[in-house]
Image (spheres, helix red, strand yellow):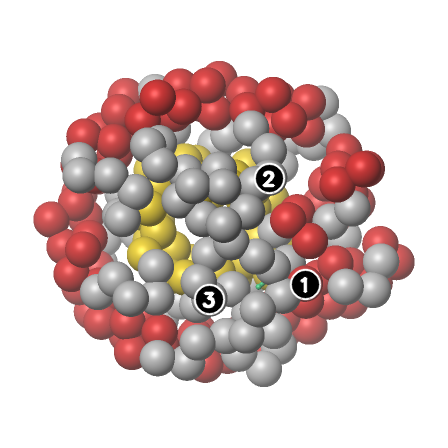
Amino acid sequence: MSLVKIAPSILSADFSRLGEETRDVVDAGADWVHLDVMDGHFVPNITFGPDVVKKLRRWTDAFFDCHLMISPADPYLEAFARAGCDRLSVHAEAGPHLDRSLQFIRSLGKQAGVALNPSTPASAVEYVLDRIDLVIVMTVNPGFGGQKFIPSQIDKIRQLRAMIGDRPISIEIDGGVTPETAPLCAAAGADVFVAGNAVFKDGPEHYKRHIGAIRAAA
Ligand code: DX5
Ligand code: ZN
């Protein structure tokens, strides 16, 4: 069993068949399912809310890794927890009270994560390390799948890995992950790889091959 985890983002799936797509990508070897929630306010795109997550729960027992690109996030955390998310990650930039949001997520019995936009320094999580299970390093500006990887983030991964030390906190890379970019991030200390376009680009019969290629490269 590999220590690296691959979390396909269903943002790049066929939204008219999200249930089947989620099932198929889990059957193809996804470790977690990455759910990109966008509000058209914090990011310039809109995806889905807790009701869709609740319906997707009928299709799989896989770990739901929920990335909330919404502001404010706090009023919706309970709904996403109840809908069946296993982890809720909020953006450090999405509100003034990150520590409160993280405490709230843990009080709901869920794992907690923080996502950092490319321009946000690693130090944004320095004082919440005891409240989180995961940091998401955005290697694109959030909002859309299929964008180009931003290489400057590799240094941030390295800084985070040093800051985390032996705490049980994963570093997840989100944006532009491919078999070419994944090894650079893994070498810097990343252990979870979100991939949208790189997994979904060629249709269901290729999900297994693409997940395997990223895993092998990382
Ligand atoms: C970006 C999302 C990512 C993205 C990844 O706003 O958070 O999860 O969809 O997609 P790719 O792998 O296509 O960059
Ligand atoms: Zn994401």
Of marks 1 and 2, which one's residue comes earlier in the chain?
2
Asked which secondary structure carries label 1, the reply is helix
Question: Residue under circle 3?
Answer: 140
Query: Is residue 211 something one can see in this rendering?
Result: no
Foreground: 165 or 185? Answer: 185
Asked if the residue at tag 1 contacts the one at tag 3, i.e. Cβ–Cβ closer than 8 Å, the answer is no
Asked which secondary structure carries label 2, the reply is loop
Q: On the picture, is 62 further left or further right than 181?
A: right
Who's the residue at 35% across and 36% down the image? 71
Query: Is residue 22 something one can see in this rendering?
Result: yes
Question: Residue under circle 2?
Answer: 47
Mark 3 CB lies closer than 8 A to ligand 1:
yes
Who's the residue at 35% across and 31% down the image? 73
Foreground: 151 or 214? Answer: 151
- The amino acid type, in three-letter code, at marker 2 is Thr
Q: Is residue 168 placed above or below 83 in the rendered structure?
A: below
Foreground: 152 or 5? Answer: 152
Question: Residue under circle 1?
Answer: 197
Instruction: Report, in whole angstroms, how far the alpha carbon at label 1 lies from the one at label 2.
Output: 16 Å
Who's the residue at 66% across and 47% down the image? 10
Q: Position of residue 150 (x, y in %)?
A: 44, 76
Q: Is residue 202 placed above or below 113 in the rendered structure?
A: below
Instruction: Report, in whole angstroms, how far the alpha carbon at label 3 lies from the one at label 1.
Output: 13 Å
Instruction: Quadrant for residue 53, please give it.
Output: top right
